[in-house]
């Protein structure tokens, strides 16, 4: 067992997978076929389905953004989606989305001249786009889902001193002071503060409501 691949070991140690494999072999044996032949046939079938749909990326992107606008996503979230998808559309816009391979998406993401976290953000947006294409039956499966881009290494969080905080507040402008106070004393992140509205602050209860959507962006 030690010499087998991790995938093979997972199958041999998973009772459900073993049972499923056994049933599949019995069904296929009556037709003189093997599991490998069945898998290859099914993959070919999926590829043929994909080739029949010629809807270009630019059309899917437009439809996806239109759907998000109707859903009423925040203006900032919509702008983020549009900017990231416009960059993808610039390289793949006229190509049928069904013809884009997983390795192409990964190569495109890895080639972006940005930090790993930003690449992950791009991947998440593309995963939503391809999921939308699945719902519209342009493609049989989500091409961008779960693409691995490397391990994110969190930067060490530095804590400023009370003297540094005092200096920071003293140099804030009238426009930046409220946001700085919220980040310093309420622990609200930069992205969340940028999307807050004065209506999110309840002055009577002394509370601030951070919408779940803002936290996920």
Image (cartoon, grey):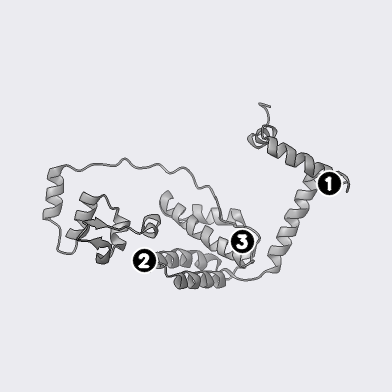
In this rendering, is residue 164 above or below 2?
below
Residue at the spot 74% in from the left edge and 42% down from the top edge = 20
User: Which mark lies nearer to you, 1 or 3?
Assistant: 1
Q: Earlier in the sequence, mark 2 or mark 1?
A: 1
Instruction: Give the residue at mark 3.
Output: 100
- Occupied quadrant, residue 210: bottom left
Give the answer, above or below, for where 89 lies relative to 150. Answer: below
Secondary structure beneath disc 3? loop
Q: Which residue is mark 1?
A: 28
- Report the number of numbered marks: 3
Spot occupied by residue 214 in the image (x, y as percentages of width and height) = 36, 59
**Considering only order in the chain, which callout, 3 or 1, is on the residue closer to the N terminus?**
1
> Separation of disc 3 and disc 2 at Cα?
28 Å
**Where, by quadrant of the figure, is residue 12 drawn?**
top right
Kindly state the secondary structure of the residue where label 1 is placed.
helix
**Camera-nearest label, 2 or 1:** 1
Near mark 1 (Cα within 10 A), the count class, few <14, some 14-19 or many ≥20, is some
Q: Position of residue 23 (x, y in %)?
A: 79, 42
Q: Which residue is mark 2?
A: 76
């Amino acid at each position: 067992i030690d010499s087998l691949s991790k995938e093979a070991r997972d199958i041999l140690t998973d009772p459900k997978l073993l049972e499923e494999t056994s049933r599949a072999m019995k069904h296929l044996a009556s037709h003189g076929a093997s599991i490998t032949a069945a898998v290859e046939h099914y993959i070919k079938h999926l590829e043929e389905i994909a080739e029949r749909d010629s809807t270009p990326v630019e059309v899917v992107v437009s439809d996806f953004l239109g759907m998000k606008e109707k859903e009423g996503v925040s203006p900032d979230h919509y702008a983020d989606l549009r900017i990231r998808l416009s960059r993808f559309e610039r390289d793949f816009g006229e190509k049928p989305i069904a013809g884009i391979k997983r390795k192409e998406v990964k190569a495109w993401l890895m080639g972006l001249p940005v930090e790993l976290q930003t690449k992950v953000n791009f991947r998440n947006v593309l995963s939503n786009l391809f999921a939308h294409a699945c719902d519209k039956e342009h493609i049989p499966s989500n091409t961008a889902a779960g693409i691995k881009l490397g391990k994110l290494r969190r930067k060490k969080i530095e804590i400023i001193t009370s003297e540094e905080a005092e200096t920071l507040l003293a140099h804030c402008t009238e426009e930046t002071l409220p946001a700085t106070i919220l980040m310093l004393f309420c622990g609200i992140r930069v992205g969340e503060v940028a999307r807050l509205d004065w209506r999110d602050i309840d002055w009577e209860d002394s509370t601030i409501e951070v919408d779940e959507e803002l936290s996920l962006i």
